Image (tube, helix red, strand yellow):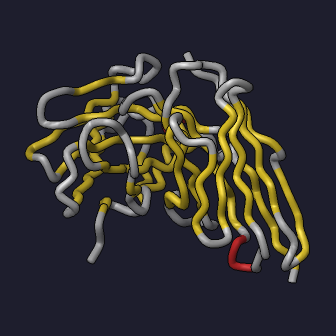
């Protein structure tokens, strides 16, 4: 069974487009996250979310917005894509709200041309 | 904000030798320190973690030590094997949205 899944695995799109990445977890976790890993492999948290609270990293442009239809899903929507958005995006989840024991999804490689 | 520094950036060891990766953090409020292993093209996977009320934790060939006073923590891998080759990330956290990762260490275990 896949604990944390993401779709698509690869996404190639042009500048200015709007795209979404989907994430689902079947672990029953309360909190989900989005991370960005750039070409230098730096991992940076973008958002954390549970059914009560969204916390946004202040450095994330408002073109990025998480959307959670239910506790098991946290999708990432990106407006007006830019070249610098090219990266691997990882979804993760953890039990509770403390951030302990995060499980990562397989990642989505986004390439903006 | 928190600043996590990780050293070395690359590390090569002979199979069977030990590997040590060190991280320092700046915010004394950080209280949770996980380590992740990321193989090429794969997701980061939690391999061991430690909370600030513990000084050392061990899981088979992997151990983590924490020195709160000095604000540093280390990953120790003993009897390294080729499958230990990967990029290892440390992280420091003081809450669920305050996760700060180190810059990663690329470990190569030479058979």
Q: Is residue B53 left or right of residue B60?
A: left
Which of the pair B61/A108 is nearer the observer? Answer: B61
Q: Residue furthest left?
A: A70
Name the residue rendered at 76%, 79% in the picture.
B82
Which of the pair A102/A23 is nearer the observer? Answer: A102
Name the residue rendered at 42%, 23% in the picture.
A60
Please, is residue B48 above or below residue B86 in the view? above
Which of the pair A17/B77 is nearer the observer? Answer: B77
Q: Quadrant of residue B111?
A: bottom right
Q: Say if residue A24 shows up in the picture.
A: yes
Please, is residue A108 above or below residue B93 in the view? below
Residue B80: % across, % down: 78, 74
Which of the pair A23/B105 is nearer the observer? Answer: B105
Q: Is residue A112 left or right of residue B77?
A: left
Name the residue rendered at 12%, 47% in the picture.
A71
Please, is residue B45 above or below residue B56 in the view? below
Residue A36: % across, % down: 48, 41
Residue B31: % across, % down: 50, 31
Marker count (numbered): 0
> Which part of the image, by quadrant, shows the N terminus of chain A?
bottom left
Q: Residue furthest bottom?
A: B111
Name the residue rendered at 31%, 50% in the picture.
A93
Q: Say if residue A40 shows up in the picture.
A: no
Q: Is residue A63 left or right of residue A82?
A: left
């Amino acid at each position: 069974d896949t604990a944390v899944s993401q779709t698509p695995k690869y996404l190639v799109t042009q500048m200015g487009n709007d795209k979404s990445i989907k994430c689902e977890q079947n672990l029953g976790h309360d909190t989900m996250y989005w991370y960005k890993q750039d070409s230098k492999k730096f991992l940076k948290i973008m958002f954390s979310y549970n059914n009560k609270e969204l916390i946004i990293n202040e450095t994330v442009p408002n073109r990025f917005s998480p959307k959670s239809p239910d506790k098991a899903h946290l999708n990432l929507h990106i407006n007006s894509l830019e070249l610098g958005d090219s990266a691997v995006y990882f979804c993760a989840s953890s039990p509770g709200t403390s951030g302990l024991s995060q499980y990562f999804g397989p990642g989505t490689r986004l390439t903006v041309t | 904000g928190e600043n996590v520094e990780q050293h070395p950036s690359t590390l090569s060891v002979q199979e069977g030798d030990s590997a040590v990766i060190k991280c320092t953090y700046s915010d004394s409020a950080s209280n949770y320190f996980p380590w992740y292993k990321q193989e090429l093209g794969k997701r980061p996977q939690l391999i061991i973690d430690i909370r600030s009320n513990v000084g050392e934790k061990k899981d088979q060939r992997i151990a983590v030590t924490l020195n709160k006073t000095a604000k540093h923590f280390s990953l120790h891998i003993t009897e390294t094997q080729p499958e230990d080759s990967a990029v290892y990330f440390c992280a420091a956290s003081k809450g669920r949205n305050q996760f700060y990762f180190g810059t990663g260490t690329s470990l190569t275990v030479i058979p």
